């Protein structure tokens, strides 16, 4: 009886060793096993939606399953650091948001766009100025006028100090030469809630976040703070059109750790481009109201580096005021 | 006496917290209190509470009824703790079900299980955990 | 009417039962949370029509919260954060040999709470959502402060030790980025620590690993001290009529607290279950029994954490704002079905709303029917040999901590929590306060500072807002009241 246990454990050990060895078998053609996409935000948001939709759509073109994992924390720095340090074999792909160009300036982690082989930019999310409908101003000009007359009285809710929507507020403040008081929240959703409850005066987050409030008539979106009008609210002007030099947008794309073999890179980039154009992907993006804006790897790298330079200059200045 | 020592530890934690909080930079946001403000309040409270506990310990006002841990039990507990740390350090190296099997098998033995029971239970648990998390919860283990 | 037909389709009902069954497993196993299960099942929305897909998600969500109470009661380890308060009275009941009754109360009152939540959602979604919006930073601060005052009530033998535990909890919660200025605090140069100490791994460690370690030393000293002996006989599960009458006020208070807290964005089932217990305790004539195996205490918290779900869904659907992690995931799945939550959906997609309400009601009936059998069956696992039981808890705690966020760092947090939990138990520090500190510390700090920004530095903001004023007065009364009204009976220790 005593030996039964030993026999069981030994035979199991052998079985596992065989299985383990099989996993180490060399991979000649890419891809041979499951690919992992690391998303830096919790399930339920835009980043997660893009990551999962891309995973679902690209599986078909790569022929292997693609898993999605959420690693949150420190404005995405934890997830991006994980991608940066993972094996450059193509089996780990990261979703990279605008914070890719920001976390270094914020002092969270030593990460810059050059640490990655960027695959493509997928989407852009412009900032927008949203206020309550019952406010004494109904247009952007009236808002600026009000802000000029009452310096510091406008309480602008942001998704956290140093976050992209805080930067949007700061840019607007500079362009309009007014003075805001910033109220940081734990993400954009709580700031919109506070605006709906009348605890603050304005938010500078994305149009998607305020969509249901605007549709219900409680909120009023005054201006888009990006380069172009948003398809969600085609009638809302941009601040640029009105003569204020503000252009802040969040964006997202995909990246590989630096040093991926070029044929692996090409396989992934091709598959992701096909997936990007597939109906399955675009359908989900439409449901979410996500504005697609494709750039290929090279274009994305140039864009991300340009943003990186900008934030390296802007963030330290902005946070020192 | 135990309470007295616990009181001193609490005071030390409070002092450490206060010192660390003092090194935080001042705030830049209008009216938003410095990042070190709340930690300092907590630190001071901890020191005060630790002081009261120390005083109670010396006066033996509250005596926590304490059963001494037997040497053997302590050793077994230390074994499990050591195994936990080793298992976590080795996370990502090797093959998950195998690591887990050895870890659990050793844990069972440290908890005075019979070897046969330990083997069966460890096999079932390691395979079941692996299957549950990788196949059903789609978590990437190693 | 059509909605009822939708839900009564056999297929939809079957999916609801499947979801409920999955939720029972996920909820019972420590280390697996409702959020994780809902997030993992969301891709089902690709393949199932909306009635069936939502049936699975709603089933898992509701029954996982209920089932978390089973492990809280049986082994003193909350299966999900929403069941922390179930350990206060549930575990003592088991030690008194009332295992069956404790498990039965968990089933019955979770279902009652869930139904209250669903009904409030059905008849008062918009007023409730409007009320939730009244909660600004000042109100959140006052709510958090009120919650922290519970430290005294859950301290047990030594209030001083309770307070130390609580403040240590707050101190631990401060590691990471400062909530206002995003300045890294107490991270000692580590990016991992900069992201903060995750609450759930800490909870898993304190309750799961800490409890195992403690049982390892007590199990050999006194056999009576452990759960496993006491639970050999499960006993009657149904409450008697007299007991039911006694719990009516606690149940009403618990359920309503749950709905309201659930509706407030940012305060989830964990806070609801604690607050429900506290409000019921304050209102009860048998305050002293709370925390020592009171059926009222257990009933109130079981009702609160399930009624909370109806409240959370109200805010998510009526305002389009996800109040917590689960509703954020649910919101995502709504969007996948082409429905954007917000006031508009109540008119444009009323069918969808009715299906959700119907499912929220049905799921409680389903687990009410199955929960008794499941609880009795699970009650049997405590008869397993202790090493098997302990090893199961250990491995689930570790892998569960990792799986939450795919970080080995979180496993270390769980180990740290395990060490803390063990030391606390060994030296007579209560566990309730440290959990309160961890959950409410950040809420108090963030909102205190946010409120001061909004008021441009004036402290009057806390006293001029009615909700905040009432909560602050309640807190003061809770802290000072007992010392004034006490008839010099005993020392405050």
Image (spheres, coloured by chain):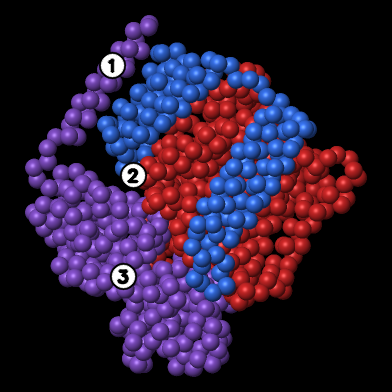
Q: Residues within 10 Å of mark 2 (few under 14, many from 20)?
A: some
Residue C159 percent coordinates (x, y): 73, 42
In the rendered structure, the residue with mark 1 lies on which chain? A
Colour applied to chain B? blue
Colour red maps to chain = C
**Pointer 3 residue:** A312
Image quarter where the C terminus of chain B lies is top left
Residue shown at the point (42%, 78%) measured from the top left: A170
Q: Quadrant of the N terminus of chain B?
A: top right
Image vertical order of residue C202 relative to residue B32, above or below: above
Q: Which residue is mark 1?
A: A10
Q: CA distance from mark 3 to mark 1?
A: 58 Å
Q: Secondary structure at mark 1?
A: helix
Q: Is residue B97 visible?
A: yes
Calculate the distance from the C-alpha at mark 2 to the C-alpha at mark 1.
29 Å
- How far across and how far down the image is residue C279, in percent? 73, 53
Query: How would you rate the neighbour count of disc 1 (Cα within 10 Å): few for under 14, some for 14-19, many for 20 or more?
Result: few
Q: Is residue A119 left or right of residue C105?
A: left
Q: Are marks 2 and 1 in contact (CB under 8 Å)?
A: no
Q: Residues within 10 Å of mark 3 (few under 14, many from 20)?
A: some
- Using the image, determine if residue C88 lies above or below residue A213: above
Q: Which chain is purple?
A: A
Image position of C301 (left or right of C58)? right
> Mark 2 belongs to which subunit?
B
Q: Nearer the viewer, mark 2 or mark 1?
A: 1
- Dot 3 or dot 1, earlier in sequence: 1
């Amino acid at each position: 009886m005593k030996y039964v246990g030993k026999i069981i454990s030994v035979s199991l050990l052998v079985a596992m060793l065989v299985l383990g060895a099989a996993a180490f078998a060399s991979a000649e053609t890419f891809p041979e096993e499951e690919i992992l996409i690391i998303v830096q935000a919790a399930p339920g948001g835009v980043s997660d939606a893009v990551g999962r939709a891309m995973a679902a759509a690209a599986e078909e073109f790569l022929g292997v399953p693609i898993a999605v994992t959420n690693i949150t924390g420190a404005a995405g720095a934890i997830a991006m650091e994980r991608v940066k340090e993972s094996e450059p074999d193509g089996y780990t792909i990261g979703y990279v948001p605008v914070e890719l160009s920001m976390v270094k300036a914020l002092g969270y982690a030593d990460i810059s766009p050059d640490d990655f082989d960027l695959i493509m930019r997928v989407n852009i999310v412009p900032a927008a100025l949203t206020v309550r409908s019952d406010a004494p101003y109904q247009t952007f000009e009236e808002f600026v006028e009000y802000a000029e007359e009452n310096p510091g009285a406008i309480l602008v809710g942001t998704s956290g100090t140093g976050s992209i929507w805080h930067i949007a507020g700061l840019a607007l403040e500079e362009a309009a030469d007014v003075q805001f008081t910033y109220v940081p929240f734990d993400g954009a959703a709580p700031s919109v809630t506070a605006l709906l409850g009348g605890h603050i005066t304005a938010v500078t987050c994305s149009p998607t976040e305020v969509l249901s409030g605007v549709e219900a008539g409680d909120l009023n979106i005054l201006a888009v703070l990006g380069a172009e009008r948003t398809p969600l609210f085609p009638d809302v002007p941009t601040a640029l059109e009105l003569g204020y030099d503000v252009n802040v947008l969040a964006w997202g794309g995909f990246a590989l750790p630096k040093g991926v073999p070029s044929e692996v890179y090409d396989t992934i980039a091709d598959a992701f481009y096909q997936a990007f154009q597939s109906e399955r992907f675009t359908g989900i993006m439409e449901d979410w109201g996500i504005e697609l804006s494709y750039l290929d790897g090279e274009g994305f790298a140039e864009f991300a580096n340009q943003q990186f330079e900008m934030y390296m200059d802007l963030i330290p200045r902005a946070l020192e005021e | 006496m135990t309470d007295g020592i616990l009181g001193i530890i609490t005071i030390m934690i409070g002092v450490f917290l206060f010192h660390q909080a003092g090194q935080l930079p001042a705030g830049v946001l209008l009216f938003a209190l410095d990042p070190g403000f709340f930690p300092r309040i907590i630190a001071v409270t901890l020191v005060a509470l630790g002081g009261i506990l120390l005083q109670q310990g010396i006066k033996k006002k509250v005596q926590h009824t304490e059963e001494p841990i037997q040497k053997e039990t302590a050793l077994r507990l230390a074994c499990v703790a050591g195994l936990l740390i080793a298992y976590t350090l080795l996370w990502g190296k090797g093959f998950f079900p195998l690591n887990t099997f050895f870890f659990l098998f050793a844990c069972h033995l440290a908890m005075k299980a019979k070897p046969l029971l330990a083997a069966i239970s460890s096999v079932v648990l390691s395979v079941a955990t692996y299957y549950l998390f990788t196949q059903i919860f789609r978590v990437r283990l190693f | 009417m059509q909605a009822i037909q939708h839900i009564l389709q056999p297929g939809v009902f079957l999916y609801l039962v499947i979801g409920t069954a999955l939720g029972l497993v996920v909820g019972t196993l420590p280390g697996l949370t409702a959020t994780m299960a809902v997030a993992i099942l969301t891709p089902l929305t690709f393949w199932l029509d909306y009635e069936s897909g939502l049936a699975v998600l709603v089933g898992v969500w509701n029954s996982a919260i209920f089932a978390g109470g089973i492990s809280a009661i049986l082994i003193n380890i909350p299966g999900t954060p929403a069941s922390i308060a179930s350990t206060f009275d549930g575990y003592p009941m088991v030690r008194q040999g009332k295992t069956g009754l404790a498990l039965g109360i968990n089933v019955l009152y979770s279902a009652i709470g869930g139904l209250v939540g669903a009904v409030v959602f059905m008849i008062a979604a918009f007023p409730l959502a409007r009320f939730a919006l009244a909660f600004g930073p000042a109100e959140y601060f006052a709510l958090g402060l009120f919650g922290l005052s519970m430290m005294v009530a859950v301290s047990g033998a030594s209030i001083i030790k309770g307070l130390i535990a609580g403040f240590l909890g707050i101190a631990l919660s401060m590691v990471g980025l400062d909530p206002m200025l995003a300045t890294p605090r107490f991270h000692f140069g580590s990016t991992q620590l900069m992201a903060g100490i995750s609450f759930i791994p800490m909870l898993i460690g304190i309750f799961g690993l800490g409890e195992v370690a403690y049982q390892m030393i007590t199990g050999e000293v006194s056999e009576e001290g452990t759960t496993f002996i006491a639970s050999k006989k499960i006993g009657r599960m149904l409450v008697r009529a007299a007991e039911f009458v006694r719990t009516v006020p606690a149940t009403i208070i618990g359920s309503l607290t749950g709905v309201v807290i659930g509706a407030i964005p940012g305060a989830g089932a964990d806070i609801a279950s604690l607050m429900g217990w506290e409000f019921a305790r304050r209102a009860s004539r048998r305050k002293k029994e709370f925390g020592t195996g009171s059926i009222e205490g257990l009933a109130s918290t079981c009702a609160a954490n399930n009624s909370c779900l109806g409240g959370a869904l109200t805010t998510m659907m009526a305002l389009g704002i996800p109040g917590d992690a689960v509703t954020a995931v649910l919101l995502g799945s709504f969007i996948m079905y082409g429905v954007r939550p917000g006031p508009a959906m109540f008119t444009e997609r009323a069918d969808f709303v009715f299906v959700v309400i119907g499912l929220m009601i049905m799921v409680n009936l389903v687990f009410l029917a199955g929960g008794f059998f499941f609880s009795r069956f699970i009650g049997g696992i405590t008869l397993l040999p202790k090493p098997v039981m302990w090893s199961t808890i250990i491995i689930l705690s570790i892998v569960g901590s990792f799986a939450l966020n795919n970080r080995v760092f979180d496993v270390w947090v769980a180990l740290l929590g395990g060490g803390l939990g063990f030391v606390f138990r060994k030296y007579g520090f209560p566990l309730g306060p440290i959990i309160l500190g961890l959950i409410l510390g950040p809420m108090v700090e963030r909102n205190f500072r946010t409120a001061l920004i909004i008021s441009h530095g004036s402290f009057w903001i806390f006293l001029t807002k009615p909700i905040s004023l009432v909560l602050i007065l309640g807190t003061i009364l809770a802290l000072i009241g007992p010392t004034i009204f006490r008839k010099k009976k005993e020392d405050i220790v």
